[in-house]
Amino acid sequence: MTRPDRSDINRLQQRAGRPEDAPLRGKDGVRLPPRYRANPVTRNPNSSAGEVFLVGAGPGDPELLTLKAWRILQSAEVVLYDRLVSQPILDMIPDGAHMVHVGKQRSNHSVPQDEINQRLVTLAREGRQVVRLKGGDPFIFGRGGEEIETLAEAGVRFQVVPGITAASGCAAYAGIPLTHRDHAQSVRFVTGHLKNDTCDLPWNDFVQTHQTLVFYMGLVGLPIIVRELTAHGMRPTMPVALVSRGTTPEQEVVCGTLENIVERVQQREVPAPTLVIIGEVVSLRNRLDWMAAVQTMDGRETP
């Protein structure tokens, strides 16, 4: 997967009727509509109070960042960012902003959640413009609700900027529609990060026809997920896809069924972060893998 170069962007702008001398967006050089070129966030000159912006960075591709998220990043004084925020998005943050990594890995939380919550309160009370930057969407397995609960209790002003969640972004880039009139009329998001390897999930509810299951952070727990779904009645031939590092140039998709997906993933040594998609819609990937088609047309190898 590659990004459009400068000539590609110029051609797109010419087709859209945008002038070549329009102001640039920033480090990546992509142009923006006029309303987003002004001072991104203005502060009340009569107030010394700070504010926290809970911002979703999307699943990885920097071009999936929303315009509002970019606009707020440009005036950030402090940015507390997670491990899953991609480097190209971090590169968009102005040099003057103070960057603080507070990311988490399985069994390794560099900064405990309670400490992150309190740090947001403290920085805002110091009068700072604070951005809490999260991969995907803050309100979908991102602990965003916990953080703004703390801010609300402390009387700190805050705003929430949604991001494209991993389920939507990764499925789209893998050529797998999460819903389809012939295959799935509902979709269910589930955390695959099973605490202490427990199985305390409503497995019976997951075994439904015409439903797509999406497990976030499901790589380590994949054998348990497969075991429990099969034990609760899901057929072993149900199609499964595991998307690794979705929407980035390193994206890798491993497809199979409940009865063989664990072995296939182990053979490929697939790295995190991953997303697991289970349902009949996965079978559509063979025909709808648009990224492979784009790479073939451009003369690039497909993963």
Image (spheres, helix red, strand yellow):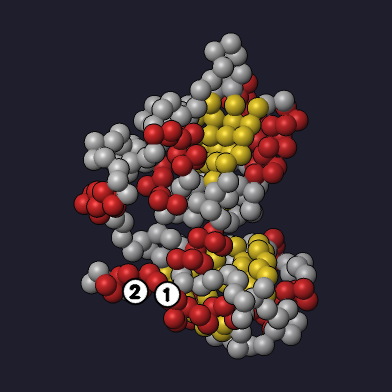
Q: Is residue 40 left or right of residue 298?
A: right
Instruction: Give the quadrant of the C terminus.
Output: bottom left
In the picture of the structure, the residue carrying the numbered disc 1 is: 289
The x, y position of residue 290, in whole percent, is 40, 72
In the picture of the structure, the residue carrying the numbered disc 2 is: 293
Q: Is residue 32 left or right of residue 163?
A: left
Density class for disc 1 (Cα within 10 Å; few <14, some 14-19, many ≥20) is: some
On screen, 109 above or below 226? above
On screen, 184 above or below 78? below
Occupied quadrant, residue 233: bottom right
Task: Kindly identify the residue that appears in the image at 25 percent across and 69 percent down.
Answer: 298
Task: Kindly identify the residue that appears in the image at 24 percent across and 52 percent down.
Answer: 11
Q: Residue furthest front?
A: 17
Asked if disc 2 and disc 1 are in contact, CB closer than 8 Å, the reply is yes
Mark 1 is on which residue type? Asp
Tell which of 46 and 89 is nearer to you.
Answer: 46
- Residue 60 visible to the viewer: yes
Task: Kindly identify the residue that appears in the image at 45 percent across and 66 percent down.
Answer: 173
Q: Residue furthest top?
A: 46
Give the spatial CA distance, label 2 vs label 1: 7 Å
Tell which of 65 and 54 is nearer to you.
Answer: 65
Task: Kindly identify the residue that appears in the image at 45 percent across and 52 percent down.
Answer: 64
Mark 2 is on which residue type? Ala
